[in-house]
Amino acid sequence: MAAPVEAYRPHDARMRVLIVGGGGREHALAWKLTQDQPSIEIVAAPGNPGLATLGRCVAVSSDDLPGIVALAISEKPNLVVIGPEAPLAAGLADALRTVGIPVFGPSRGAARIESSKAFAKALMREAGVPTARAIRCIDAPAAKRAAREFGAPVVIKASGLAAGKGVIVCSTIAEADAAIDSMLRDDTFGAAGREVLVEEFMEGEELSLFAITDGTTVLPMLAAQDHKRLLDGDLGPNTGGMGAYAPVSLSSSALVDDAVERVFVPTLAALNAAGAPFSGLLYAGLMLTAQGPKVVEFNCRFGDPETEAILPLLEGSLLEPLLAVANGSGLSDEPLQWSPGFSVTTVVVASGYPESPQKGAVISLPPREANIHVFHAGTAFNEGGGLVTTGGRVFAVTAVAPTLAEAQRESARVAGAIEFEGKQLRRDIGWRELERSAGATRD
Ligand code: AMP
Ligand code: GLY
């Protein structure tokens, strides 16, 4: 029998939070936690130069599970928040819980809601959650037959984690055949693409709806809309996300209530019944179809860049619900409170993004301004201590303003004032919403 685990005791009275990750999402999470409790001590692994202005960064990769666990054991935080999906899918939350450390993020089993699209689809089907029809295939001829069954357009999805690149929307059967061959014959996505979903094409606007949950209580956040295409007008190649805004007027309180009842609650119940209770942040990508909202995908963590748009509008505490979930002390069902403004996040990306982002470009930042948040996503210090680019998405610039039009203008203005060679950005984040209601104000 294993020796009993000694009761875990956080280091001392001052609140210490370990943030796992080093992107814009993690910078925004740390910023909000610091707003909630100014005396908080933030430790980030690996962090980034933005996070370094809020706390201490420790050079441990978010994928180094033993390294993160060892860091947590020595830092004794009151809370660990895991940002990215890969460590969750690999079981980081389980490893931390085993040694008694309070963690916000689902177990490896529950993270399958994101790490296996085949698992998520089967779960949704059993639970009666509205979603596109799909056929799971592991060989190319069967997948091609399935694609013909649905007819074009059709969507081919690698079941596993593929860094946002595993979904191919095909407008012809020939494209579907090529996508199927790339996954099931040529192994382009490795293990992630050896099981695929051939999925019915859905039409409609997409929403990202996040909920903080302990597995039973569901606290929905403000809906946001992501912008995945590189260029203005939603043109150009798909990216990890060029911007987001919140709130989205399509997301009425009736729609959110409906999504909680028909999507979140049955999905959480099904995960529980499958022996994989979920706690953490459940992210539903919803498509608003003519037949009502349907799930496009689930993610098991905060979305990026939506988090950078949503958190600056959160008036109440983020720390409290995260702690309640991590400690299992009972999540209050009191709705989250939001400020009556609009938020637009413009992502500034590197030259060559998304195919081959250039690293090492020297960055010059404009002076800080009120109501503007410059979240670091892909930055680092070079040997001389200068700030340089190190990833595709370099900054997420969020402006909060009384109108969406103003938030868009301000966000694009400050994003435009960040200088480095070859930078790219969109200036139209929120355009669909502006078309819906020019210069709208919230009631
Ligand atoms: P995912 O990674 O599953 O969010 O998919 C990436 C993008 O592909 C989504 O945001 C949608 O725009 C698109 N997509 C995924 N599934 C479908 C579908 N069944 N019908 C239409 N578009 C889809
Ligand atoms: N915004 C999309 C994602 O976080 O996966």
Image (cartoon, rainbow, N blue to C red):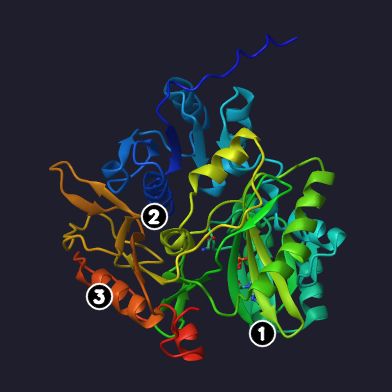
Nearest the camera: 352 or 76?
76
**Residue 344, above or below 325:** below
- Measure how far apart labels 1 and 3 are at the Cα level: 40 Å
Q: What is the crowding at mark 2: few (fewer than 14 residues within 10 Å), some, or many (at least 20)?
A: many
Left or right placement of residue 210 versus residue 151 in this view:
left
Whichever of labels 2 and 1 marks the residue nearer the N terminus, that label is 2
The residue that appears at 47% across and 90% down in the rendered structure is 435
Q: Quadrant of residue 209?
A: bottom right
Whichever of labels 1 and 3 marks the residue nearer the N terminus, that label is 1
State the residue position of label 3. Answer: 413
State the residue position of label 1. Answer: 172
Residue 426 visible in this rendered orientation of the protein: no
Nearest the camera: 407 or 61?
407
Q: Is mark 2 within 8 Å of ligand 2?
A: no
Residue 350 visible in this rendered orientation of the protein: yes
Q: What is the crowding at mark 3: few (fewer than 14 residues within 10 Å), some, or many (at least 20)?
A: some
Q: Secondary structure at mark 2?
A: helix
Residue 248: x %, y % from top left: 53, 76
Residue 125 numbered tag: none
- Measure how far apart labels 2 and 1 are at the Cα level: 36 Å
State the residue position of label 2. Answer: 24
- Measure how far apart labels 2 and 3 are at the Cα level: 19 Å
Residue 156: x %, y % from top left: 68, 70
Q: Secondary structure at mark 1?
A: loop
